[in-house]
Image (cartoon, rainbow, N blue to C red):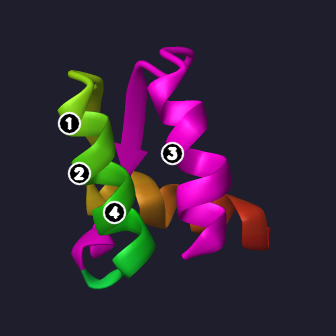
Amino acid sequence: MPILEEFYHPLIQSGRIRKGWFIPGWESSFGARWERTHLEEIGAEIVELDEEWVEDILNKSQA
């Protein structure tokens, strides 16, 4: 928790982050849930990346 509260929270509150991208399955990550909650609180845009996009990126990285 210290990295979330002491590093990410001030960064999000600074206003420098205005958008967050979330991969499929983000709901299973405590950190991602925490991050999304705080991004929503400041009105940041939330982008849901689709499964096909993620698979394409993973396939390209393995080539």
Q: Amino acid at mark 4?
A: Trp
Q: Is residue 22 magenta?
A: yes
Q: Are marks 2 and 1 in contact (CB under 8 Å)?
A: yes
Tell me where the magenta segment starts and ends, as one range.
1-27
- Kindly identify which residue carries mark 3: 9
Mark 3 secondary-structure assignment? helix
Residue at the spot x=21%, y=22% of the render? 43
Looking at the rendered image, the disc whose residue lies closer to the viewer, 3 or 1, is 3
Mark 1 secondary-structure assignment? helix
Residue at the spot x=36%, y=79% of the render? 30
Of callouts 3 and 2, which one flags the residue occurring earlier in the amino acid sequence?
3
Looking at the rendered image, the disc whose residue lies closer to the viewer, 4 or 3, is 3
Q: Are marks 3 and 1 in contact (CB under 8 Å)?
A: no
43 or 24, nearer to the observer:
43
Of callouts 4 and 3, which one flags the residue occurring earlier in the amino acid sequence?
3
Looking at the rendered image, the disc whose residue lies closer to the viewer, 3 or 2, is 3
Q: Amino acid at mark 1?
A: Glu
Q: Quadrant of the C terminus?
A: bottom right
Q: Are marks 4 and 2 in contact (CB under 8 Å)?
A: yes
Please provide percent x and percent y for residue 5.
54, 58
Q: Are marks 1 and 4 in contact (CB under 8 Å)?
A: no
- Which of the labelled discs sits on residue 37, or is there none? 2
- Kindly identify which residue carries mark 4: 34
